Image (cartoon, rainbow, N blue to C red):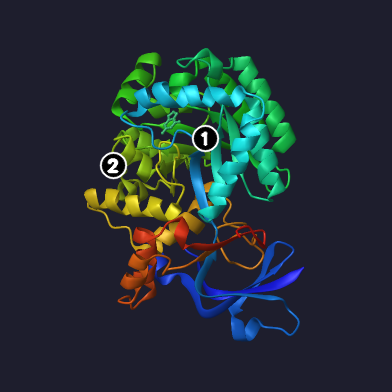
Amino acid sequence: MRKLIRGRTLSFHADPVEVENAFTYHEDGAVIVEDGKIAAVGDYADLRQPDLPETDHRPHLILPGFIDTHIHFPQVQVIASWGAQLLDWLNTYTFPEESRFAQQGHAPAMAERFLDLLLAHGTTTAVAFCSVHPQSAEALFSAAEARNMAMIAGKVMMDRNAPEAVLDTPQQGYDDSKALIAKWHGRGRLRYAITPRFAITSTPEQMQMAGQLVREHPDCHVQTHLSENRDEIAFTLSLYPQARDYLDIYETYGLLSDKLLLGHSIHLEPREIARMAETGSRAVFCPTSNLFLGSGLFDEAGLRAAGVVSGIATDVGGGTSYSMLQTLNEGYKILQLRGQKLHPFAAFHWVTRGNALALGMADRIGTLDTGSDADLVVLDSRATPAMALRMDRAGTLAEELFILQILGDDRSIAQTYVAGEPMLG
Ligand code: XAN
């Protein structure tokens, strides 16, 4: 089935540093979609064809769908929990909540709500932590498959320092992950992420098993957390006294590669930064979470200068919004506190092509290039009275993007397409 989607198309095609000069924008543009892929993008006048069905989104912008590189599916009912920093927050709210995913029917119900929320916020791909229970990953993969979404997910492996109800064992964690990989990895648009939660909740025996999974499945992503909070780092190092630093634990067990996504990566030692750059391991900036949990200020420019590739993510439910626009808003402010500037072109590059590059998937998602998957977001820059008023004084595309970046949220998502199919309304 071939169809045309009309609007102001915007897509990026270079590294973030060059991004101000490396985007393609069509004021009266169009995307032609065929069999879920982008068959062409360009000026409407050049692409229109008699008998081709058309959807007209003018004056809205059409971008590649947003990519969220770190989010916790079983935390949909933890978001906005009061008064704690990371370790307290995990013990008080998060682990008890994740234990509910053992209950029959809970994970499938939450999976539908979770994906509804992602799509309502313009997110078409997410890299998700599930609970320790394999049925939570089963539920998320099934629901994502039904919507044909490019979802990356994994059940957390965790065998200590949490309530019994959210613990596995090294062998169980390995066996469950292995079975999930066999069933879901590479099925349609789905991919598996091997997911040792973080070093605090995995014994050395479990880290060993995680390393074995990584060796056996080098094409799977790997996701965990690194250096989010000072108490977390101190506790981690007390559990692994041989380690040179926090990253060294993951290195010892063979987890470091360009498939590894290290959520937070805030309080890093120079050696850790150098090893991340050498191994291609990714840092993932989670601004709303870092502010909400009082964790610290991510050093985007420092990591970039050192050669570390960074993704950006919501980290719901430590994060306070599903919106990648609100994530950019808080990200802008954190970088201001660091004396760094997040230019709107770099920001929109980051949540589309930049995150796709961080995932090694920029040939398929995060772009409007011909041949890539037709995952799209349609953005309304005048979605609220405050935005409309501000837009009346905006003269450039950069200004418009910045208004979306600072004031936008799910109200600005006019439509979300997954593999060419409209998912809202
Ligand atoms: N470390 C974490 N950090 C966070 O923000 N959310 C979590 O669920 C988590 N687990 C370990």
Residue 305: x percent and y percent?
Answer: 33, 50
**Residue visible at 71% across and 72% down?**
3
Mark 2–mark 1 Cα distance, whole angstroms, equals: 21 Å
Q: Is residue 71 left or right of residue 408?
A: right
Q: Nearer the viewer, residue 238 or 295?
A: 295
Report if residue 12 is visible in the image: no
Q: Quadrant of the C terminus?
A: bottom right
Residue 255: x percent and y percent?
Answer: 52, 30
Residue 16: x percent and y percent?
Answer: 41, 60
Q: Quadrant of the N terminus?
A: bottom right
Whether disc 2's CB lies below 8 Å from ligand 1 is answered no
Bin the neighbour count of mark 1 within 10 Å (Cα to Cα): few under 14, some 14-19, many 20 and up.
Answer: many
**Mark 2 or mark 1, earlier in chain:** 1
Quarter of the rendered structure image containing ligand 1:
top left
**Residue visible at 60% across and 58% down?**
424
| Snapshot quadrant of residue 186 | top right
| Residue pointed to by mark 2 | 297
**Residue visible at 48% across and 22% down?**
96
**Residue visible at 57% across and 56% down?**
362
Residue 10: x percent and y percent?
Answer: 50, 70
The amino acid type found where label 2 is placed reads: Leu
| Residue pointed to by mark 1 | 223
